[in-house]
Amino acid sequence: MFILCVILPAQLTFSQVHFGIKAGVNYSNTILQQHLFSEVTYVSPEFKTGYHFGIFADLPVKNNIYVKAELIYSDKGSSSPATTLAESYTLYLDYLNMPVILGYNPVKGLNIEIGLQPGYLVFARSVSKGQSSSFIDFFYNKFSLDYVTGIEYFIDKLGLGVRYEHSLISLSDIETRNEEGIGKRINEFNKNFQAYIAYKF
């Protein structure tokens, strides 16, 4: 009897979990935050188009509230046009992200979501004039943390969604000094817009 009391609720809970797959496009950018003395300036390169794909599982909690966990491979970064001082380049930052989402279902099919997204940097590289450089991987922190928010709409098992992600901690901490010994610290933050299609099994 005791074993049944333990196993049966676990089986019922597991049966409520919805598994699925998702894939879509990224529209990402990196914000450079430069600190010089007490002055803080922001530099934002151009947006870069990328991709993401992965799996998810959601579990109803109470009424119209649910929690969702995902495992997503995501190609982020930014691009910058050529200037008189530098060549054009594209920055590729590929992450393995693990969002943990709290969702609300106000009406059938519509989901509103917010959550946190830990991530691990798989690799970082910069491409300029067709030449790829991976040495920049040294400057980036391997672990990241973002906040995420978005909406999605499902018709039966098929859904469409949009999401916004933004770094809570700096992707890199770079400090430089000029010939006079004056130091400048640069922090970098991701921002990323996603559009995707999802399918629940």
Image: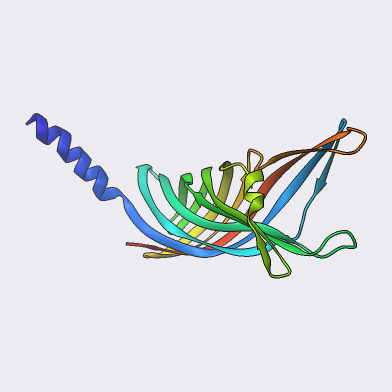
Q: Nearer the viewer, residue 58 or 65?
A: 58
154 lies left or right of 17: right
Could one spot residue 65 in this view of the protein?
no
Residue at figure coordinates x 43%, y 50% from the top left: 70
Residue at the image position 25 percent from the left and 46 percent from the top: 14
View extreme (left): residue: 1
Residue 149 locus on image (x, y percent): 57, 48
Viewer-closest of 38 and 63: 38
Q: Is residue 84 left or right of residue 118?
A: right
Quadrant where the N terminus sits is top left
Residue 83, percent across and down?
Answer: 87, 63
Work out which residue is located at the far right of the displayed protein and give it: 180
Colour scheme of the picture: rainbow
In this orientation, which residue lies closer to the viewer: 165 or 200?
165
List the single residue furthest toward the bottom: 130
Q: How many marks?
A: 0
Name the residue at 40% across, 56% down: 55
Residue at left 65%, top 56%?
Answer: 77
Quarter of the image that includes the C terminus:
bottom left
151 above or below 49?
above
